[in-house]
Amino acid sequence: MNTLLISFCVSFVITFLLIRYQHLHGHLSGDHEFSGPQKIHTRSVPRIGGLSIATGLIAGSLFIAFKDQLFSLVAAILVSCIPVFGIGLTEDLKKNIGVQKRLAFTALGALIAIYAIPTSITSLDIHLLNQLLGIALISTLFTCFAMTGLANAYNIIDGFHGLSSMIAIITLGAILYIAFKQSDLVIFKLSLCMLAAIAGFFLWNYPRGLIFLGDGGAYLIGFWIALLSILLVERNAAVSPWFALTINIYPIFETLFSIYRRLIHQNKSPGQPDAIHFHTLIYRRVIGNANPQLSAADRNARTAPYLWILVVMNAIPSILFFDSTLALQIVAVVFIVTYWYLYRSIVRFQTPTWFRLY
């Protein structure tokens, strides 16, 4: 409870201060670009919400370190986050850091975590892949790729008020629940720490969007979740490796599908932004077409709940079958098929009536 209160209160207060005094830093922190294909807002908003999350996370983590004598573990985790959050925050302020450079710094953070904690992905419950992961170099490269990919995935889904942050809260809730069931209080507390820090930010971000998560916040959240997902599986033999994949399936598949869409259908670089992400289609075609009288702000606020529900429906069976690789594989396939069906239907202006919330 103390961890939750410390992380939440610090994050909540810092977010308030960032909003209250944005006139002092808005020329640096504000998102002044309104013309990009993925841009929805129409006024400058601070995009350094990750700063409040990082502050709350540090405060809560240090409390855990001192209270539970986990100095080396917490120090290794926090140090590995420095290049990840640092490059994201730099992009939020300078707005000229390329995707490749951001991914390189995130990969550096992953390598630090792999060797300093240490941790890595050593099993996928598939015989051939397990043999390959038994080779240290392959395991290291795959772990680095997975952590970097999920961190970037959270940045990709960060398109509407409350979307990325609530997805993270749901995911962290699932991780901490399984950690509690396995009596792994370290992962439980580290999950709770980030969850509370995000919640302190979320109350200011949703529904009005007074502050944005920014690249720093999105990369930090995705990286932290990736690390805890791996640690949970590696520290608890009863948890299937597929739990880590299935609980994060939405941002992972959104990223993979975006790469496929841009490379194959649009014949352009995967790093180029576009306006046909799943969440953008919901905003424009599901909500916008059915409710043209709504303001852009209202449509924005109504978008995220669609995906919150989709992720919750995926999280419930993932939690129930956390120890069954076969069941989790089925859950992952069901999610992918559902995602593809809904995306295809919306693109063709044939949104199923049961999918409309408003």
Image (cartoon, rainbow, N blue to C red):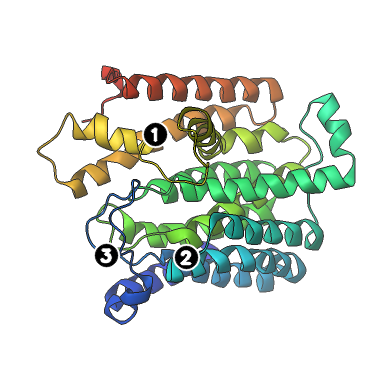
Question: Most extreme residue toward the left, as rendered?
Answer: 293
Q: Which residue is mark 1?
A: 278
132 relative to 74 in the view: left or right: right
In three-dimensional space, the C-alpha distance between marks 1 and 2, rounded to whole angstroms, equals 26 Å
Count how many numbered circles sit on residues in the image.
3
Label whose residue precedes the other's in the sequence (2 or 3)? 3
Label whose residue precedes the other's in the sequence (3 or 1)? 3
287 relative to 355 in the view: left or right: left
Query: Alpha-carbon neighbours of circle 3 within 10 Å: few (<14), some, or many (≥20)?
Result: some
Q: Is residue 267 above or below residue 142?
A: above
Q: Which residue is mark 2?
A: 96
Identify the disc placed on residue 44. Answer: 3
* Along the viewing direction, whichever of 235 and 18 lies nearer the viewer: 18
Q: Position of residue 285 (x, y in %)?
A: 25, 30
Q: Amino acid at mark 1?
A: Phe
* Residue 231 appears in the figure: no
* Along the viewing direction, whichever of 121 and 314 lies nearer the viewer: 121
Residue placed at 66% from the left, 71% from the top? Answer: 67
Q: Position of residue 109 (x, y in %)?
A: 68, 61
Q: Amino acid at mark 2?
A: Asn
Which one is closest to the eye, mark 2 or mark 3?
Answer: 2
In three-dimensional space, the C-alpha distance between marks 3 and 1, rounded to whole angstroms, equals 24 Å
Query: Alpha-carbon neighbours of circle 1 within 10 Å: few (<14), some, or many (≥20)?
Result: many
In three-dimensional space, the C-alpha distance between marks 2 and 3, rounded to whole angstroms, equals 17 Å
152 relative to 73 in the view: left or right: left
Which one is closest to the eye, mark 1 or mark 2?
Answer: 2
